[in-house]
Image (tube, rainbow, N blue to C red):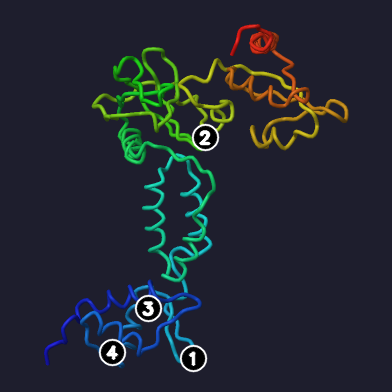
Amino acid sequence: MAKSAGQKKKLLVLAKLFMEYTDDEHGLSTGRILSELSARGIAAERKSIYDDVDTLRSCGMDIVLRRADEWEYFLASREFQLPELKLLVDAVQSSRFITSKKSGELIHKLEQLASRYEAGALQRQVYVTGRIKTMNESIYYNIDKLHAAIGANRQISFCYFSWTVQKKKQLRRDGARYRVSPYALIWDDEYYYLVAYEKQNQMLRHYRVDKMQSIRVEEEKRTGQEAYERFDPALYSRGMFGMFGMFGGEESQVTLRFAAGLVGVVLDRFGTDVVLTPQGEDTFTFSVKVAVSPQFFGWIFGFGKDARIVAPAAVVDRFAAYAAETLAQYNSTEEA
């Protein structure tokens, strides 16, 4: 006897039904399964459903039979559990570098990994008040190209832009392409940065990925391998303050004195490996390598009298000069 229409796709449809309509709180009875198959043009008998369920189990699907109002089957475990999907949804929605449009697309795809009932719980998770999202939709493809270049040991070229007061993009270097050797991607302060070796200046620099345009993977092999071998991404990102812009400032080992109540702030910034030396009961000192820049000085400013640069003297002098220049703006009689 010829097989009924749709038999070749029956197992695939059954698997999708269990993925979409069942979870820990919702199941499908044999009668409901037969009805759903019939609605999709697939004829089936009750006995065949038992055999099909056994086949899906043998292929790894954790389908369980339980007694509720009636006997029903449900998918007891999945690749991702609901709490894990909620975590991923929150990460996608709260990420600044992902546009609102792409956030919606990614969350919709994550919803497909849950039952339709659990998907509703994910939708209630996705709102973050006042979240500012990036406007650069191409960042996903940029990241893919950068990973490809790093994996293939190739140089890249690209255009780099900044924003004008009129909120227009303005290409740097009058549109001339940058050419660098990419080595690492760093996630810092809700943005992706590319750390790359620039042969012209013989140094590592960082670029914000969402400000890179027209990325091209070149045929030439990367240079700067020796510089990269001395590079520690974790230390680099901890030492940079506000990695926006292109340059973080000259690196220097500095000694800082902080109020005892700021231990948590220091550990959050520099990690638990930093050595803290108590100075009485009220303060402690520590030494770290940082990029000495206006962003670093601004970070110190933010703690007021509870933070102080102790050494080296050159950095202390630079900070004092920076503070004096900043204060002078407010002592000026010039109108705003």
Mark 4: few, some, or many residues within 10 Å (few <14, many ≥20)?
A: few
Q: Are marks 1 and 2 in contact (CB under 8 Å)?
A: no
| Mark 1 vs 3, N-terminal side | 3
> Which residue is under mark 2?
188
Give the Cα distance between marks 3 and 4. 14 Å
- Kind of residue indicated by mark 1: Asp
Query: Residue 10: horizontal and vertical position, in percent?
Result: 25, 79
User: CB of mark 4 within 8 Å of CB of mark 1?
Assistant: no
Q: Which mark is residue 69?
A: 1
Cα separation, mark 1 vs mark 2, equals: 52 Å
Secondary structure state at the residue bearing disc 1:
loop
Image: 307 above or below 110: above
Q: Amino acid at mark 3?
A: Arg
Q: Earlier in the sequence, mark 3 or mark 4?
A: 4
Q: Position of residue 217 (x, y in %)?
A: 27, 30
Locate residue 92, reporting x and y percent.
Answer: 46, 49
Marking on residue 48? 4
Q: Tell me the distance, in whole angstroms, between the alpha carbons under discs 3 and 2.
A: 44 Å
* Relative depth, front residue between 304 and 312: 304
